[in-house]
Amino acid sequence: MKISDGNYNPKKISEKVEVFGNNSVGAFGAGNSKSGYIFKASDVLLGNKSFTNELVMTGSSNLLGNSFLKNFVFVLDWVSHKIYLKQIRNSSSELESFGFGYRFIDNKPAVVYVFQEENFPLKVGDSILSINNIDLDNLDHETACHYFLIE
């Protein structure tokens, strides 16, 4: 779940992680890298439904992503501008990260966002050559899709 920077008040959130980069891609591609935050919201109201302890990221727009929607069967009503949700599983939102996120760009995994910590060794744009002794430097399209799907 992502909220626009204008809807975020850092003084009201005690526990947050500062990040830099771009952690989402839309129909028109990825936006520019920028600073933001990841935090757990105690209560998020969408329409008439309240969600508790959801992970929320700040950004340039308000978005519901795949990690949120995977817990629902949903219908998008384009005419009425509504989303109908039926919860099919209840999974807790936990921030599980090594301090960075990556995305495949031209069949190569690249760092797209990092936690803003002093002396963090990775930077946005760095190439990921291998993970757990699996060479990721020379992937064809089919192999890149395989690793993208198990990400």
Image (cartoon, rainbow, N blue to C red):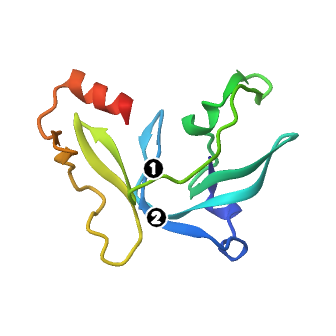
Q: Residue lying furthest left in this view?
A: 138
Q: CA distance from mark 2 to mark 1?
A: 9 Å
The answer to whether 97 appears left or right of 45 in the picture is left
Disc 1, SS: loop
Residue name at image x 27 percent, y 39 percent? 105
Q: Residue lying furthest right in this view?
A: 48
Residue name at image x 29 percent, y 38 percent? 104
Quarter of image, res 145: top left
Q: Indicate whether 108 appears above or below 73.
A: below
Foreground residue, 25 or 116? 116
| Mark 1 Cα-neighbour bin, 10 Å: few <14, some 14–19, many ≥20 | many
Do callouts 2 and 1 mark residues in contact (Cβ within 8 Å)? yes
Residue 142 x %, y %: 23, 21
Residue type at mark 1?
Asn
Disc 2, SS: strand
Which labelled disc corresponds to residue 19?
2
Residue 27 x %, y %: 48, 33
Residue name at image x 22 percent, y 25 percent? 143
Q: Indicate whether 39 appears above or below 142.
A: below
Residue 43 x %, y %: 78, 54
Residue 76 x %, y %: 70, 23
The answer to whether 142 appears left or right of 71 in the picture is left
Residue name at image x 30 percent, y 52 percent? 111
Question: Which quarter of the image is occupied by the C terminus?
Answer: top left
Name the residue tied to disc 1: 23
The answer to whether 110 appears left or right of 59 in the picture is left
Which labelled disc corresponds to residue 87?
none
Quarter of image, res 37: bottom right
The answer to whether 1 appears left or right of 19 in the picture is right
| Mark 2 Cα-neighbour bin, 10 Å: few <14, some 14–19, many ≥20 | many
Quarter of image, res 137: top left
Residue type at mark 2?
Val
